[in-house]
Amino acid sequence: MSKENGEGKFAQKWVSYRPEIKVLDVTIRDGGLMNNHHFSDEVVRGVYDACVQGGIDYMEFGYKGSKKIFSSPEHGPWKFCDEADVRRIVGDNDTSLKLSVMADAERTDYKEDILPADQSVFDMIRVATYIHQIPVALDMVKDAHDKGYETTVNVMAASTVGERELDGALELLASSEVDCIYLVDSFGSFYSEHVHFLMQKYLKFAGARGKTVGIHAHNNQQLAYANTIEAAIKGANLLDSSMAGLGRGAGNCQTELLLGFLHNPRYRLRPVLNCIQEHIEPMRQELRWGFDLPYMITGLLNQHPRAAMDFKSEEGGGDLVKFFDSLVSSE
Amino acid sequence: MSKENGEGKFAQKWVSYRPEIKVLDVTIRDGGLMNNHHFSDEVVRGVYDACVQGGIDYMEFGYKGSKKIFSSPEHGPWKFCDEADVRRIVGDNDTSLKLSVMADAERTDYKEDILPADQSVFDMIRVATYIHQIPVALDMVKDAHDKGYETTVNVMAASTVGERELDGALELLASSEVDCIYLVDSFGSFYSEHVHFLMQKYLKFAGARGKTVGIHAHNNQQLAYANTIEAAIKGANLLDSSMAGLGRGAGNCQTELLLGFLHNPRYRLRPVLNCIQEHIEPMRQELRWGFDLPYMITGLLNQHPRAAMDFKSEEGGGDLVKFFDSLVSSE
């Protein structure tokens, strides 16, 4: 792939790769939204091993959920990502794979629950925030940065944020300690033209302060992979993906597709395929993630996928046309 | 959507549409490759009704297969598309929907089997050709054009054609009677950068002679819809799609996704969703089309999907990693 299409250099760019691009596998973290983070150790270890063998750059295990807000065992271990739980899988993680964990603004006791980096198995803290939580997110970033972590901020539901608010948020984030700012298509409603436009905007703010930009796409309109490619071509250097697309609702950009595109020799497709076959696909009947028409409809309408998730959980499946009518008429 | 991204006019273009873009539904034609063209009249009528109600521009019924080469009832009626069979569904097709039929180079008795247009229910003949059959295709185009039809030429497997051969073919086609030249990604191996590059090339040859360009994409790498969007943005005006993506192997660009993108008020999503629910999805267990990892692997390797189709037809499903190994080692 290439940064930009120049007809003359097309072939040369296409057979090469951009070494600064990194892949962050969110299989267990985003997939945990489909089973309340109740993955077995065997599955988590399978994904971890595949990430290591596949040359993936980062793997995300789950959330640092507040134990004051969320209770166990209603929520599985990957809602909290206690150091002991992660180390049961990875030991001291003596590999080239870096580990990340997500911290939701206002739902994480970050000062207490996130250890100094030199005592933690994690390398990166990713702060997830809605636009109205930016001040909290900034404090979380500073806390994580000061503790020695790499940091990202993921501004969720960017497709619903007004342009001036977004510019203001990006200006604040660009002035913060954060290393990477993420474009997040929570509702899977972006087309390539949105991605191009917003990636230019994010890069303008981030690049001016020496920060990188990431992309997290959802597959509601079957564009998660395509939009991730487009973001990479425009300059995104941190790409979220998941094995077999496992993730909330329509799921994510598929790691196995992305590796094929990137052409970086450090990546290996075979262990990822093996993990999908051994560990991920056997969960499909129960978890039921992935592209489907109810998600397409919420994506098209730029709505949260929860209505589609409810529809899909109905016994025997509901009436798709009625579902379409109900969403259109409730707009 | 827009022709090109200009940041200033982004929003205006995005909420508008390009009226010259037409959609050609290939559900029954490409889907027929999964059941030897044995669709029931009820299914064909369901798709026809949905195309009419959905404002689709063209619907393709199947092939004009040679009865000297192909026999009935091994092949169903939509392999031959006899006028009487089509009229049983559409009467005289007194609607705004135009009807097309595909004629394969060297597998069609076109001089005998294609009636003059004024005696036919069809409006358009689409000639499908491999690069080595261009002279036959040109004669077929002339025959159809002289009989009064709209015509297209679909140069199949463009991803395997050398650049000089392709340029030569495009020069010949641009000088012919054909109305539209199709970029066809038979193996589903293109990325957006290929589509951009090739669409520019096709438009250069076709545009110089006042012809239009079409796109026919396959979903092996889950990019059929994304690549169709990219082709449209670059200037393709005839877009192939199918309901629920029904088509050979990984299937096609999904009509229901495409209508959402195009924003042309003539299109209606609801009848298409209804048809998918009533007629298309009930066939999925038997026909088993659509994106799946074996197709991803053949797409990635720019190979015909037949190996993946064989793999998927194995009882109980085969070993994906062994399949990957076998294709990589046979390269």
Image (cartoon, coloured by chain):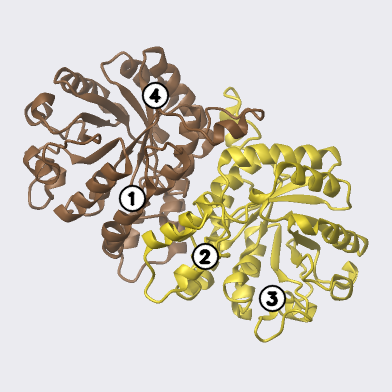
Chain colours: A yellow, B brown
Residue B287 is left or right of residue B41, and the answer is right
- Quadrant of the image occupied by residue B7: top right
- Location of residue B56 by image quarter: top left
x and y, in percent, of residue A149 in the image? 86, 61
User: Which residue is tagged 2?
Assistant: A307
> Are labels 4 and 1 on one chain?
yes
Query: Does mark 1 fall on the same chain as mark 3?
Result: no
Q: Provide the chain ID for the residue under circle 1.
A: B
Q: Which residue is mark 1?
A: B272
Residue at figure coordinates x 33%, y 46% from the top left = B242
Asked whether the beta carbons under mark 3 and mark 2 sit within 8 Å of each other, the answer is no
Give the CA distance from mark 4 to mark 2: 48 Å
Which chain is mark 4 on? Answer: B
Across and down, in percent, residue B113 comes to: 8, 31
- Compare residues A296 and B17 and report the one nearer the observer: B17
Disc with the residue nearer the chain's start (3 vs 2): 3
Which is closer to the viewer, label 3 or label 2?
A: 2
Q: Position of residue B111 (x, y in %)?
A: 9, 25
**Eyeballing the image, is B22 above or below A69?**
above
For the residue pair B65 and A20, the one nearer the viewer reads as B65
Disc 2 sits on a residue from what chain? A
